[in-house]
Image (cartoon, rainbow, N blue to C red):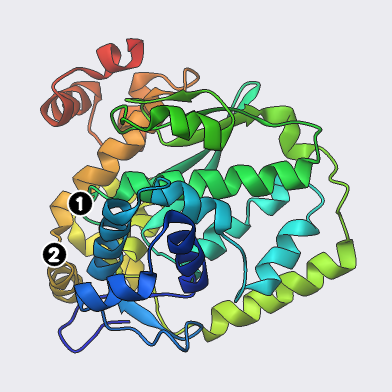
Amino acid sequence: MRDAGGEERVPLITLPNWVKAAAVCGFSIGEVFEELGVEADLLHAREATVRGSDIDRLMAACVARSRRRHFPFALGETFAFEYLPELETFLTTSPTLRESARVFEWLRLLINPHLRMQLHEDGPLASLRLDWQGGGTPQVFQWFVEATFVSVAKFGRALLQGRGDMRRATFQSPRPTYAEEARERLRVPVAYDQLHNALEMDRRLLDLKLQGAFDSLHRQAEQLVARRLAERPAPPTTAIRLEHAMERRPSLLGQGIASSARELGLHPRTLQRRLADEGLRFAELQANLRLKLAKAWLADAGLDIESISERLGFADRRSFTRAFSRWTGTTPSAFRKG
């Protein structure tokens, strides 16, 4: 959904959480809206939307105003499913954590299309990784990561009921002055300047039978979620659709815009124009996704560099090495060695 000026608008269905977090941190969220001139129907949060850039401005302003607490931690701790009861029911009646993780894709579609959390498994370790989807990662992204991780850790502990916990939280951002508070709020060791924003856990916990499992209610909740998704007014951006298409079909990563346009059912000029409206170029988006996937696959010791080169659509390993060195200043082999 876009406004009259062509800027993307995102749902503000989590407004009650922002209100509570602001109160915990000692200020009024209403005053922040007024001072920033952010237009939103605060009386009808279920249907309210704001410009995507305003969400970033709101987060930055809330962090600056907070004195008692770091605002993102308060936002994560106070998060609840006020206007999304079917998602909470699906979550709390899930038979396993693996099944409950499906909620993350729905939350992305219903709350913020730019925040994508995915489950990764590597040997005895599993991790929930949070990435920014779209052009250019904003500085405030680290605060959204913090809020999300605190909330996920809270609900994860509620589901596990003392039978397990997260092992570690990692952040791509540099170590902040409030790092000790992060450790206290997350209740796990925290590391910064890492390859991924991730919550790590023992892989065995993914398939542990949860005590709240309720199969019939779980299925009903899933049906209600499907109905809500079908009724949602805001489709994903063209950039997000294109990234998803390339993730489904990695062969598109080595092809031109015509192939990707065909995958999305668009004319190449239409795809080019829509990306331009979102401030992106096809080659830039393709290169960014190639780099993101390259880093992720290089972290998997089971994949050799030749296979990764082929997956990413490069003619050979040498071409991949040249491109990766241009992007990062180091070779794939050196990056893998860390």
Badge 2 amino acid: Gly
Label 2 to label 1: alpha-carbon separation: 9 Å
Residue topped by disc 1: 136
Task: Classify 10 Å Cα crowding around label 1: few (below 14), some (14-19), many (20 and above).
Answer: few
Query: Which of 131/180 is in front?
Result: 180
SS class, disc 1:
loop
Going by the image, does 325 lie left or right of 173? left
Q: Position of residue 233 (x, y in %)?
A: 44, 85
Establish if 139 lies above or below 266: above
Answer with the quarter of the image where residue 337 lies.
Answer: top left
Q: What label sits on residue 57 in the rendered view?
A: none
- Please tell me how crowded label 2 is: few (under 14), some (14-19), or many (20+) other residues with Cα within 10 Å: few
Q: Left or right: where does residue 232 sit relative to residue 242? A: right
Query: Does residue 82 appear anywhere in the picture?
Result: yes
The percent coordinates of residue 115 (x first, y second) are 40, 55
Q: Nearer the viewer, residue 276 or 251?
A: 276
Q: Earlier in the sequence, mark 2 or mark 1?
A: 1
Q: Which residue is mark 2?
A: 279
| Residue 255 in view of the camera | no
Helix or strand or loop: what does disc 2 sit on?
loop
Q: Residue at x 20, y 44 (%)?
A: 287
Q: Is residue 94 left or right of residue 319?
A: right
The answer to whether mark 2 and mark 1 are in CB contact below 8 A is yes
- Quarter of the image containing the C terminus? top left
Pick whichever, 317 or 55, lies toward us. Answer: 55
Q: Amino acid at mark 1?
A: Gly
